[in-house]
């Protein structure tokens, strides 16, 4: 049985709780502008996709850190990533990003909130460590 998940409603309720904002992007994508603990804001993209190998529907969250370059000390950040609960580091479309995913049938509102919060906080922290700026 497939679980019905209203991502827009969950994100909208969460944004209202924390002073963020949700921007519906497409039928399957939303952007949430998250306030971070450092007084900055971070964009997180939430979307669904079907895995190619398992044919399972996933809920994905990712947030850009910065353009990927060979000068980024990836070993340091990958070692630190072992401390994250949900997040992993990826390179997507030329950007270093923080990402998290869950099978839709396992997703709850509380889990989604925790995932979005961690993605935004870690992406914001890494962005500031690497670039010294707040760009994303």
Image (spheres, rainbow, N blue to C red):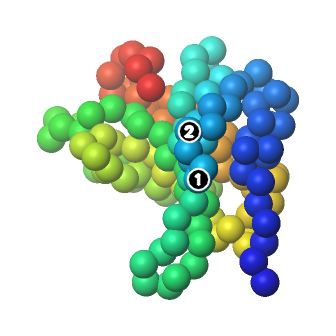
Q: Is 115 placed left or right of 75 in the picture?
A: right
Query: In x, y percent, where is residue 80?
Result: 44, 48
Badge 1 element: loop
Residue 64 percent coordinates (x, y): 41, 37
Front in this rendered view, residue 13 or 120:
13
Residue 49 locus on image (x, y percent): 52, 65
Residue at 37%, 17% (x, y): give it.
Answer: 132
Q: Which residue is at a point 58% across and 53% down the rendered structure image?
A: 28
Label 2, secondary structure: give it: strand
- The answer to the question of whether label 1 and label 2 lie on touching residues, with beta carbons closer than 8 A, is no
Where does the image place residue 136, in percent across and percent down from the top left? 44, 26
Q: Is residue 89 visible?
A: yes
Query: Is 47 left or right of 89, judged from the image as shown?
Result: right
Q: On the image, which quarter does residue 8 sit in? A: top right
Q: Is residue 57 above or below residue 123?
A: below
Residue at figure coordinates x 75%, y 77% from the top left? 2
Quarter of the image containing the N terminus? bottom right
According to the picture, the residue beneath numbered tag 1 turns out to be 28
Q: Which residue is mark 2?
A: 25
């Amino acid at each position: 049985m497939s679980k019905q998940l209203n991502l827009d409603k969950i994100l909208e309720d969460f944004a209202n709780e924390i002073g963020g904002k949700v921007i519906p992007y497409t039928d399957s994508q939303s952007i949430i502008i998250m306030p971070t603990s450092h007084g900055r804001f971070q964009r997180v993209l939430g979307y669904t996709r079907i895995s190619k190998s398992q044919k399972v529907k996933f809920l994905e969250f990712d947030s850009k850190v910065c353009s990927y370059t060979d000068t980024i000390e990836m070993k340091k950040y990958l070692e630190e990533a072992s401390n994250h609960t949900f997040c992993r580091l990826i390179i997507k479309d030329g950007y270093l990003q923080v990402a998290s995913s869950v099978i839709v049938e396992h997703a709850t509102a509380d889990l989604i909130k925790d995932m979005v919060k961690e993605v935004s906080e870690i992406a914001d922290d890494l962005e500031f460590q690497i670039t010294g700026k707040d760009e994303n």
